[in-house]
Amino acid sequence: MASKYLSSLSKEDYESLTQKLWDIQNHRCFICEEEIDLKLNSTNIDHIKPLANKGKDSEENFALTHESCNKSKQDANLKIAKVLARLKKIQDDVSLKGSHGASLKDVLKFYDGSKFDFKWTQEDNIVKYSFSQIGDNKIYQAPIFTDNLSGEKSIFLEIPIEYLYHDEIINPRGINSSISKLVKEFDKGNPQLHLSLVRIHDNKLKVFDGQHKAVAQILLNTKKLVVRVFLNPDIDRLTETNTNAGSNLRQIAFDKSIMRQLNYTLYSERVKKYREEHNLKEDDYTFSEQQLVDYFKGDGANIKKYITDAIKHSVTNSKENKLKDYIDFEGKAKDLPISYSAFDKTILSTFISTKLILKTPIDYKTDEGLNPREIEIDQIVKLLNILADIVYVNKFQPEIGVYRIENKIIDKKDSDISDEHLIAYRMSKEEIMHNWLQYLQMVIKAYMSNTGKIINDDEIFQQPFDEQLWKNIRNFVKNLRDLPLWKDRGMASTVFSGKNTYDYWKAIFQTAKTPDNAVVLTKPLNYMEMIKYDDTRE
């Protein structure tokens, strides 16, 4: 809504108001909080509280901003826009460091939280505590409540953020876009959704549920949060409940990568529980995956899933995994070529069996470097690195990204899109990746067969690959990358227009033509021919 007050000002009066606001704001933009140079930067004056929200059309409700910040602000209310801009700074900083996304941990760090251990004692049904590290030496006390259904004990406290930490084990999620709705809700003074859940671990108060609620309050400069603190809770139960909230109960939307991480945690907890109930030492892994499944009889199906997801999590999050830098874990990025969903449905589903449960001890031949699970994880990561080196590293450009690539080609606005970038982008489409991975899998199976090895398909990656097989894999990927269709810009409006089915690309690779007989390749793919490569071509 236009300002009658600003419209009534002369040029000189407008400049005078600009100068006045600039001084009040210490020469900084109200939204991004970065410096404004009045000689070099274009600026806007805008209402802090919008007129539509009953904001006043007067000087006390005006702020000075960079023109670009005002145009791109995330909310009409400049107070909210400032908060969300601050969060974006945190997220961008975390993204530069290669993390999956900012979380409560990063927000607490930005706001000077997560500094001190929680000092407390329990006497009968009372917990006593203090916050002496921040100069508050008062001895507080809180009654302990026992939950009638679970028997879990908890207390309700108001905690300074200096004593709060993010529980990355039970709640590994990053902050998603819904945070803006909570910020707006809390800014209105609506308190019903404030409460987060906390547990005490190593004398640290860790938020394991309600991190978005905590983040929204902290972004609005709340220095103390009211929380429910669980005392010596069943960690297995808390983790499983959080997992169910994002899967079976559908209370919150966990993406697949987070579910994998939670199941990895649940698997670790089951291993720990098995050891404790069999009086085994902390480093004892002489029992098998099958023994775990048999022991936790009523939970056998879940244990199998935890085992599989633990392997997938270990592969995906390996420090050695170069392909990880090209995977969009949040599902909404426009700068990375492979969505986690596609990665899961194609690469992980192709190479990691959901059926194989080992009967050998978990630490079987670990000292010899021949542990089947360790070999499996290491070799899949090595394969991912081959894909990364040949197709993506120093070739795909995140600053160009994946948004409307084919449309840009059709509109002749593709001068900044290199052939290498286009190749990586097109090869990464889920329906395409699924099909060429079947050929790569055949390269591995055929080599095993031709060298006289009869191996169950589920166990292939648990057998050490020799150097010739790795060479065959590299050659196949190079030949695949060099197929002319990936950089043929004339196909932007035909073959690569929109999303096609798995069967569509299966037909192309098998027949060299689309189902409606349009020629795409010079000949069908032949994986035996594609394991030969002339290195002088590079």
Image (cartoon, rainbow, N blue to C red):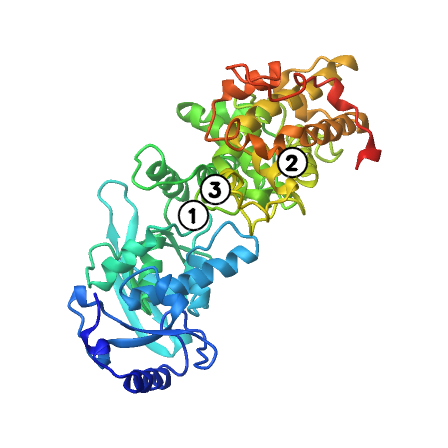
Where is residue 296 drawn, in percent x and y?
Answer: 44, 27
| Quadrant into which the C terminus falls | top right
Instruction: Note whether residue 160 is visible.
Output: no
In the shown orientation, is residue 266 left or right of residue 418?
A: left
Q: CA distance from mark 1 to mark 2?
A: 24 Å
In this view, the residue in front, 272 or 376, is 376
In this view, the residue in front, 216 or 155, is 216
Name the residue rendered at 68%, 39% in the picture.
Answer: 385
- Few, some or many residues within 10 Å of mark 1 (<14, 14–19, 20+): many
Residue where numbered disc 2 is placed: 384
Residue where numbered disc 1 is placed: 173
Q: Are marks 1 and 2 in contact (CB under 8 Å)?
A: no
- Few, some or many residues within 10 Å of mark 3 (<14, 14–19, 20+): few
Q: Amino acid at mark 1?
A: Arg
Q: CA distance from mark 1 to mark 3?
A: 28 Å
Where is residue 354 drawn, in percent x and y?
Answer: 52, 23
| Quadrant into which the N terminus falls | bottom left
Q: CA distance from mark 2 to mark 3?
A: 26 Å
Residue where numbered disc 3 is placed: 404
Answer with mark 2 or mark 3, whichever residue precedes in sequence: 2
Q: Amino acid at mark 2?
A: Leu
Instruction: In the rendered view, tell whether residue 524 sits above or below residue 48.
Output: above
Q: Nearer the viewer, mark 1 or mark 3?
A: 3
Q: Residue furthest left?
A: 54
Q: Are marks 1 and 3 in contact (CB under 8 Å)?
A: no
Answer with mark 1 or mark 3, whichever residue precedes in sequence: 1
